[in-house]
Amino acid sequence: MPLRPRYTGLIDRYRDRLPVHDDTRIISLGEGNTPLIRLNNIPRIIKKSVDIYIKYEGLNPTGSFKDRGMTMAVTKAVEEGSRAIICASTGNTSASAAAYAARAGISAFVLIPEGKIALGKLAQAMIHGAVVLQIKGNFDQGMDLVKQVGKQTPITIVNSINPFRLQGQKTAAFEILEELGGAPQFHCIPVGNAGNITAHWMGYKEYHEHGIVNDLPRMVGYQASGAAPFIRGKMVDTPETVATAIRIGHPQSWDKAWSVQKESNGWFDECTDPELLAAQKMLTEHEGIFCEPASAISLAGAMKDIAAGKIPEGSKIVCTLTGHGLKDPDTAIKQSTRGVIPTAANLDAVKHTILENLK
Ligand code: AN7
């Protein structure tokens, strides 16, 4: 007897709440079940008495929350007899699609924007054997092309317009509710295509409707200032941000996300690139948590809205960190203050550097 049942992925765990059959062949890499980490130092540094929990989705198998949706989407694609999947991606979806296609033994085609994909994500798509099409255009243009391919070929689209993606991703809300024993007052989350905010709200509502919990959070979605259609109130044609994951101007779940905002009595807000980078750095240096720039916007936004009083002191807040920091090593290295210190290979030089750099 194992001391604890083996964790075999979120489809197995939430089988009764997901569209699978007893004989469905599940394509899983053990995704989900990610840590919910309470921040110890940042509330003290910002001098606010708030309870902030980080849902560290970067610890999924390919390093982002996309795996929750991808296990479902690829499982269903295989069940329906599909031999190939396709997506447009700012990076994480392509990495996840590539990995799950490899696991399933089917082909993956991924369209990525030229020059604007973080190095780790590109490496993942390539090493897993996906066919990587680098288009002379941005994510939104790639998404348009993928939709056309989907209409004309039997290839399954695994972007979040595939409803199974949202089904898988709603399980993150289940985990949060189970762990906290109820809903946080606020759930802060990065928004690009707005699939994830939509999926979380589905999950929260599902447990609420079934009487498993009595309360619901207010959903707060954050966008980078240069790519903020929900704040502008209209699509953005030339999105720009250092947070390449959310460099999206035409969100695919536009209507759904507005419903989430209204139903949950939440709001959308924006953060500048310097603000989200500062939050990324704060998390790494003061909490030991490394996320990619797009993910840090959830904390950047929360800190801003706490300072503005929109999120009152005493609140319980969950911030989703959607992707691991290792996804984007270039930005991490640029962000590091100390750099590397060239040191002679002798004890005196090493001791000297240590003494100069003690905290
Ligand atoms: C780290 O990979 O759209 O609002 O093509 O990678 O559900 O789109 C990535 C999105 C947030 C936004 N954080 O989520 C893609 C892609 C990270 C992301 C988002 C993405 P949605």
Image (cartoon, rainbow, N blue to C red):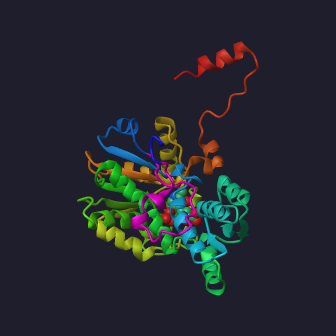
340 falls in the magenta region = no
Q: Which residue appears at 65% of the width and 15% of the height?
A: 351
Pick the front one: 239 or 326: 326
Q: Is residue 39 left or right of residue 102?
A: left
Q: Quadrant of residue 255?
A: bottom left
Residue 252 in the image: state x and y as whole percent: 50, 74
Pick the front one: 140 or 5: 5
Residue extending farthest to the front is 1
Q: Main secondary structure of the magenta part?
A: loop
- In the depicted structure, whether residue 43 falls above or below residue 200: above
Residue 56 in the image: state x and y as whole percent: 47, 49
34 falls in the magenta region = yes
First to last magenta residue range: 6-35
Pick the front one: 163 or 307: 163
- In the depicted structure, whether residue 222 falls above or below residue 319: below
Residue 106 in the image: state x and y as whole percent: 68, 69
